[in-house]
Amino acid sequence: MEPTPELIDALYREEILHARRLTPEQRLLAGPRLFDSACEVAKAGIRWQHPDANEDQVLDILRQRLVLARRLEESPC
């Protein structure tokens, strides 16, 4: 069952409302937590793409992707 556009919009609105209720301290801590969560999702994708990779190899691939992402962000368009 696919989520409807209305459900997606409602969930997004709820995320925004939740973020607005955060204290400055909570917002400061949210950045590293979001980064950690994104890394876990990326590592899951890497494991799916490379099922034979061990944890060190998964981390190496993640690091390579982060370096590439930084280079892409810093390069002029």
Image (cartoon, rainbow, N blue to C red):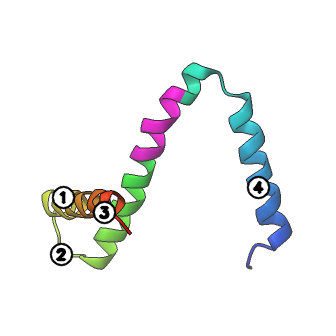
**Taking 52 as reference, is 42 left or right?**
right
Quarter occupied by residue 18: top right
Asked if the residue under mark 4 is in contact with the one under mark 2, i.e. CB atoms within 8 Å, the reply is no
Residue type at mark 2: give it: Asp
Figure quadrant of the N terminus = bottom right
Q: Nearer the viewer, mark 2 or mark 3?
A: 3
Residue 50: horizontal and vertical position, in percent?
24, 76
Question: Mark 1: which amino acid?
Answer: Glu
Q: CA distance from mark 2 to mark 3?
A: 33 Å
Mark drawn on residue 52: 2
Asked whether 20 falls inside the magenta stretch, the response is no
Mark 4: few/some/many CA within 10 Å (<14, 14-19, 20+): few
Q: Which residues are magenta?
A: 28-36
Residue occupying the point 57% across, 25% down: 26
The answer for how far apart the CA atoms under marks 3 and 4 are is 34 Å
Packing grade of label 2 (10 A; few <14, some 14-19, many >=20) is: few
- Dot 1 alpha-carbon crowd within 10 angstroms: few under 14, some 14 to 19, many 20 or more: few
* Distance from the alpha carbon under mark 2 to that under mark 4: 36 Å
